[in-house]
């Protein structure tokens, strides 16, 4: 799984997939093309070669990961092995824990809503607001 000394670089889309940041290589390619993956603070193309000690910035959902490449791989393996391919910077780790704490304390109210109201919910709402006629026969 690890690259040998002769192959000192690997495509960034392959590495992101092997390091388990994305489920498929096509998702990794889409993220790179959309500019959500940067190497040394610069936008790159999916075919760009990644080298040891490169700083990679990955933006997923509402989090940003800053990682340093520690090893290269071209094949996907177990998660324990994938975690050895990179090291997250201390600033990035602190920022992620701070954002997780903020999300935990201030939950988005809309996340608790689950689709359209049922007939039962509509009847309850009608009773509370006094609008319309309420038929309790069903």
Image (spheres, rainbow, N blue to C red):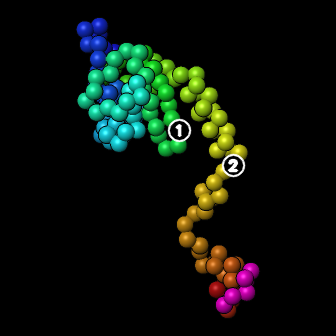
Q: Position of residue 54 (x, y in %)?
A: 40, 19
Report crowding for label 1: few under 14, some 14 to 19, many 20 or more residues within 10 A (C-alpha): few
Asked where in the image residue 71 lies, by quadrant, the reply is top left
Q: Is residue 116 magenta?
A: no
Q: Nearer the viewer, residue 47 or 113?
A: 47
Report crowding for label 2: few under 14, some 14 to 19, many 20 or more residues within 10 A (C-alpha): few
**Residue 29 vs residue 114: left or right?**
left
Image quadrant containing the C terminus: bottom right
Residue visible at 73% across and 87% down in the picture: 130
**Residue 81 vs residue 3: left or right?**
right
**Residue 19 vs residue 98: left or right?**
left
Q: Is residue 131 magenta?
A: yes
Marker disc for residue 106: 2
Q: CA distance from mark 1 to mark 2?
A: 16 Å
Residue at the outermost top position? 5
Above or below 126: residue 50 = above
Q: Earlier in the sequence, mark 1 or mark 2?
A: 1
Total labels: the figure holds: 2
Above or below 105: residue 48 = above
The stretch of residues the image draws in magenta is 127-132
Q: Position of residue 48 (x, y in %)?
A: 28, 27
Residue visible at 71% across and 45% down in the picture: 105
Marker disc for residue 63: 1
Image quadrant containing the N terminus: top left
Marker disc for residue 90: none
Q: Position of residue 72 (x, y in %)?
A: 35, 18
């Amino acid at each position: 799984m690890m690259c040998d000394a002769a192959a000192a670089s690997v495509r960034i889309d392959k590495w992101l997939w092997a390091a388990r940041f994305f489920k498929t290589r096509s998702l990794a390619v889409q993220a790179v093309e959309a500019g959500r993956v940067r190497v040394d603070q610069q936008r790159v193309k999916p075919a760009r070669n990644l080298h040891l000690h490169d700083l990679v910035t990955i933006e997923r959902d509402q989090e940003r990961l800053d990682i340093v490449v520690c090893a290269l791989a071209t094949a996907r393996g177990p998660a324990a092995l994938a975690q050895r391919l990179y090291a997250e910077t201390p600033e990035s780790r602190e920022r992620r824990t701070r954002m997780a704490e903020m999300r935990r304390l201030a939950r988005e109210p809309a996340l608790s809503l689950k689709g359209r109201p049922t007939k039962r919910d509509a009847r309850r709402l009608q009773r509370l607001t006094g609008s319309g006629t309420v038929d309790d026969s069903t």
